[in-house]
Image (spheres, rainbow, N blue to C red):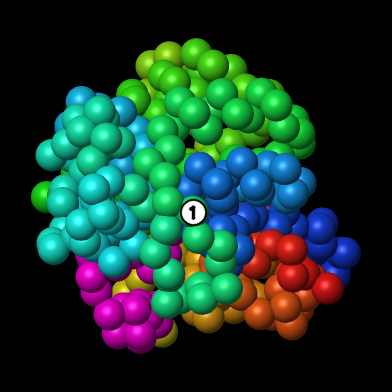
Amino acid sequence: MLRSLTLLALCACADPPTPVIEAHRGAAGYYPQNSRTAMLASMDDGYAGLEMDVVLTADGVPVLSHDPWVHETLCERVDGAPMEARVRIDGLLLEELQETYLCGGLPDPAFPNAVLHAESMMTFDELVAALRFTEASLRVHIDVKFEPGWTPPPEAFADAVLSRWFEADPPQSFYVSSGHAEALRAFEDWGSANAKDVPTSLSWPSAPLDADAVRTGLSAELRRALGLEDPVRLAEDAGADGVALYYELAERHMVASARARGLDVALWTLNDPALLSAHARWPVTSLITDFPGDLP
């Protein structure tokens, strides 16, 4: 107990290190989210961190997408026909996915000023290959979109992502995040079995697909306030190296506690320059934002 209190005091009093600013989905405020255009432009723009979402095709190829389906309002068919319904990515071979659908050419209501560029989904192989030509100091954040009932099992994600990463051996550091503890354990188990270091971070709160964000946040905060859920303890129970917190639910003492217990802390998704500037003084490891170039 005395050691924990001492560490908390040090976290509170010492000047915190400058956090890494991560380009969320490749800087979705500027470029089509998770697109080839976004990833390559963010590398060229020199951001310190780069975050992307990964799902698997029917033939087990990791591609960059936030959802386990081809997005019905942000994507379209190659022949120009609109999407009439969601199409599951795990039901398409990579060749079918890339030859049939284009994403990024339609306006994103969440980011009306982002550039538009229609293109096929980027593969994780392409991303890792491109990393060889950018700064070695870049921190890569791989958010695994394992979703029960919608995607292959977490072990398939771990093998597909990590085998490609370590075979290509890019110079950058990386970490893997998920809101599902079983997904993180699958990545940690792969690392143990292959004698590789695989840093992981538990995202909190975790929400079911299509869940209302406000309701999810209120529910998570109520469980935490009642002592029914502790994101730091959840991360430790998952064997994770860090915790990624929704910034509106993060409190400074919670962050200090996580850091004192040896966990990295990321905050998501801060899209206001004043918020970015204020939270940059917190003892966090990284700040995740759709506008990484807007920090004062």
Residue extending furthest toward the front = 79
Image quadrant for the C terminus?
Answer: bottom right
The residue lying toward the viewer, choosing from 259 and 106, is: 106
x 24%, y 48%: residue: 79
Q: Is residue 83 above or below residue 225?
A: above
Residue 286 appears in which quarter of the rendering? bottom right
Left or right: 37 in relation to 272? left
The residue lying toward the viewer, choosing from 131 and 73, is: 73
Amino acid on which disc 1 is placed: His
Q: Secondary structure at mark 1?
A: loop
The residue lying toward the viewer, choosing from 131 and 158, is: 131
Image quadrant for the N terminus?
Answer: bottom right
Badge 1: how crowded within 10 Å, few (<14), some, or many (20+)?
A: some
Q: Is residue 179 above or below residue 165?
A: below
x 56%, y 62%: residue: 115
Tell me where the magenta segment starts and ends, as one range: 202-224
x 29%, y 66%: residue: 73
- Residue on which the image places disc 1: 117
